[in-house]
Amino acid sequence: EVQLVESGGGLVQPGASLRLSCAASGFTFSTYAMSWVRQAPGKGLEWVSAISSSGSSTYYADSVKGRFSISRDNSKNTLYLQMNSLRAEDTAVYYCAKDIIGVTGNDYWGQGTLVTVSS
Amino acid sequence: EIVLTQSPATLSLSPGERATLSCRASQSVSSYLAWYQQKPGQAPRLLIYDASNRATGIPARFSGSGSGTDFTLTVSSLEPEDFAVYYCQHRSNWPPITFGQGTRLEIK
């Protein structure tokens, strides 16, 4: 059974840093690209970042470019999102999601972790 | 950046009725479009990938169609569990990947 379990969310002040993790199981993690998607309270879905299966290619939304960094450790089956210089508008539930090879769509999602940026 | 516009914002229907949800892209995305369902407090669930292919385990009452800039998600006969928010997503000429703003399907 495929499982994605996010952790690392919490309440932080503006300007602070946070690292999210996503532990994957039930599939060959190193074969698949992965993504982070967020959802502000009461709002729609926003793509944040994606990483290739090897980790050699990374992609970011303009809203987080230069502040967030996506990475992965295929030996630990874990995806990361390092978030620096956090702003109030980064407050959201952050989901990790598994990509499908050669297809548009994310077939498995974690339950999400809430990040709240507030003074 | 490709903008996806979903309509209507809210759709009020009764169980057993047919639902038709629209997603329009600001430029062609070919067939690089997916549809998701999201219920309160839950993660999104993939329904349709590549515009018209049902994901694993998705009931046959869900179907997707379209290519280029105009796409449709159809639910042939609504079940009580189908009332939720639906999003379209593209992956053409990315980054960025973008989502539509969502259509809320509510019980009439």
Image (cartoon, helix red, strand yellow):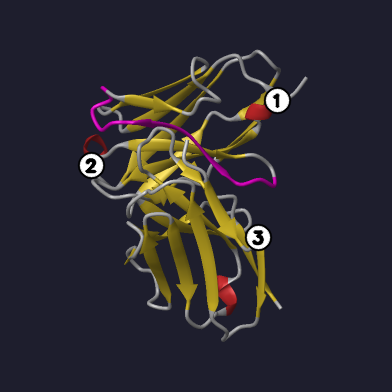
On the same chain, marks 3 and 1? The answer is no
The alpha-carbon separation of the residues under discs 3 and 1 comes to: 26 Å
Q: Amino acid at mark 1?
A: Ala
Which chain contains the residue that carries disc 3? B
Which stretch appears magenta? A42-56
Toward the viewer: A86 or B88?
A: B88
Residue tagged 1: A88
The alpha-carbon separation of the residues under discs 3 and 2 comes to: 38 Å
At horizontal 33% and vertical 52% (from top left) the residue drawn is B30
**Residue B22 among magenta residues:** no
Identify the element where label 3 is drawn: loop
Q: Which mark is residue B9?
A: 3
Residue tagged 2: A28
Toward which corner of the image does residue B67 lie, by quadrant? bottom left
On the same chain, marks 3 and 2? The answer is no
Q: Is residue A28 above or below residue A89?
A: below
Q: Amino acid at mark 3?
A: Ala
Q: Which mark is residue B44?
A: none
Left or right of A99, for residue A17: right
Visible residue check, residue A72: no
Q: Amino acid at mark 2?
A: Thr
